[in-house]
């Protein structure tokens, strides 16, 4: 009796269910980013040029040096001239290396404001790609989203030097309230159209949605991750609205309340271009749903109860840390099991309970 053999193939992330290769996927992400990038160049010509040029130059150079150092050096260097060793190293540099660094650089440039200093961009971009990707072994091996790591590094170190302007505004029209939650009382329509201060990529929601449609059509983004991320955040925001009303506060209609928070800050940009990163999220469907829930919950609590006006990037990094746990082989499966369904119900329910307890018993205010 012959036994069936099973072939086990070891591959690096991203594990995307597509017929084409990594280059095609990365190129699709670049194309999906174009509406946002083009809008940023129209709205902040000089700021966008500065952000994009510095970010791309730093990350592409770091990627190239990484490839040359780790793959491009013959064992016996004495037998080869410098030019020969350089040519040998370049033979390992692929189009996928260029596109991977380009994607991270464009996202990093878009999640910072036009009023970001050149040194903050340079240091943040270098920290993002080195600490968020290259130290883990390069493309497919990184645990964290490089753009999110760079953004956090830049804001923690140089946040006090950054300033935000509304699209098409002069540099003399500066505000320190980049998000709806930071004090700017904007209507959902203003938030949707981008008539608010913010980073280069977060303001015009139309451009972001165009990119989302393209990513979904090309199957680069997992729609279940996007829907779960938005739905979880909306649920917690609705619960927060109930607590505000219960404590005697005044809010607009619950629909406007939730919509305003969904459209504020970098939440929608993060939902489309960052939380969907196939390298840093889990492999199986149940794990991806739990991952998206974790990112949304972390973003909500950081936004409302921490000393930060925005929590999307931090929430994604926290979820990146949990991704290997969700993908642990002993309990991870592509099929939904009873424990997965229980967790998918208990986790958001527990988060909603914490919101009510924090506001009513803890005395915190949204």
Image (tube, rainbow, N blue to C red):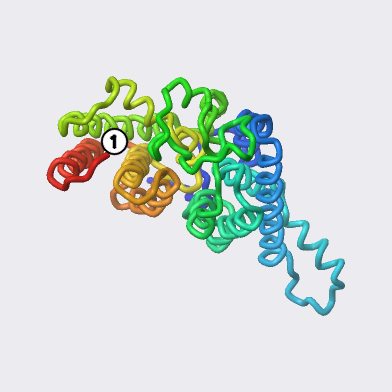
Give the side of residue 135 with respect to residue 52, left or right: left
Give the side of residue 262 with respect to residue 131, left or right: left
* Count of marks overlaid on the render: 1
Counting from the top left corner in percent of width and height, residue 252 is at 29, 22
Q: Quadrant of the C terminus?
A: top left
- Most extreme residue toward the left, as rendered? 361
Find disc 1 in the rendering and name its residue.
Answer: 336
* Mark 1 neighbour density, 10 Å: few (under 14) some (14–19) many (20 or more): few
Q: Is residue 117 above or below residue 260?
A: below
Counting from the top left corner in percent of width and height, residue 3 is at 40, 47
Give the side of residue 143 with respect to residue 130, left or right: left
Q: Where, by quadrant of the figure, is residue 210 drawn?
A: top right
- Observer-nearest of 49 and 270: 49
What residue lies at 72% left-to-right and 63% top-to-bottom?
Answer: 68
What residue lies at 69% left-to-right and 46% top-to-bottom?
Answer: 50
- Observer-nearest of 273 and 90: 273
The kind of secondary structure element at disc 1 is: loop
- Observer-nearest of 100 and 148: 148
What residue lies at 40% left-to-right and 44% top-to-bottom?
Answer: 309
Tell me if I can see residue 331 in this picture: yes
Counting from the top left corner in percent of width and height, residue 340 is at 25, 40
Tell me if I can see residue 9 in this picture: no
């Amino acid at each position: 009796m012959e036994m069936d053999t099973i072939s086990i193939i070891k591959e690096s992330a991203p594990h995307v269910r597509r017929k084409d290769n990594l280059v095609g996927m990365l190129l699709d992400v670049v194309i999906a980013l174009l509406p946002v990038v083009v809008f940023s160049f129209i709205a902040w010509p000089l700021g966008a040029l500065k952000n994009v040029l510095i970010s791309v130059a730093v990350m592409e150079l770091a990627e190239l040096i990484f490839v040359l150092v780790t793959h491009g050096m013959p064992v016996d260097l004495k037998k080869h001239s410098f030019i020969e060793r350089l040519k040998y190293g370049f033979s390992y540099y692929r189009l996928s290396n260029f596109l991977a660094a380009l994607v991270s650089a464009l996202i990093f440039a878009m999640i910072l404001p036009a009023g970001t200093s050149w040194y903050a961009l340079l240091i943040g971009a270098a920290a993002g790609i080195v600490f968020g990707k290259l130290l883990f072994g390069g493309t497919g091996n990184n645990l964290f989203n490089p753009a999110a790591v760079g953004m956090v590094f830049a804001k923690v170190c140089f946040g006090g030097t950054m300033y935000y302007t509304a699209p098409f505004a002069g540099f003399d029209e500066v505000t320190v309230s980049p998000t709806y939650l930071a004090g700017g009382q904007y209507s959902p329509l203003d938030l949707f159209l981008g008539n608010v201060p913010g980073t280069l990529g977060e303001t015009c929601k139309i451009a972001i949605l165009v990119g989302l449609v393209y990513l979904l059509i090309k199957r680069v983004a997992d729609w279940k991750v996007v829907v779960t991320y938005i739905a979880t955040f909306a649920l917690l925001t609705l619960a927060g609205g109930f607590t505000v009303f219960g404590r005697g506060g005044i809010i607009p209609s619950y629909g406007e309340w939730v919509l305003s928070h969904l459209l504020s800050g970098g939440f929608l940009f993060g939902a489309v271009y960052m939380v969907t990163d196939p390298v840093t999220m889990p492999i199986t469907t149940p794990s991806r749903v739990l991952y998206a829930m974790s990112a949304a919950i972390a973003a909500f609590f950081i936004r409302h109860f921490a000393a930060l006006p925005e929590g999307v990037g931090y929430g994604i990094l926290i979820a990146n840390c949990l991704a290997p746990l969700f993908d642990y082989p002993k309990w991870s499966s592509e099929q939904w099991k009873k424990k997965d369904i229980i967790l998918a119900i208990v986790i958001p329910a527990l988060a909603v309970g914490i919101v009510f307890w924090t506001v009513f018993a803890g005395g915190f205010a949204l």
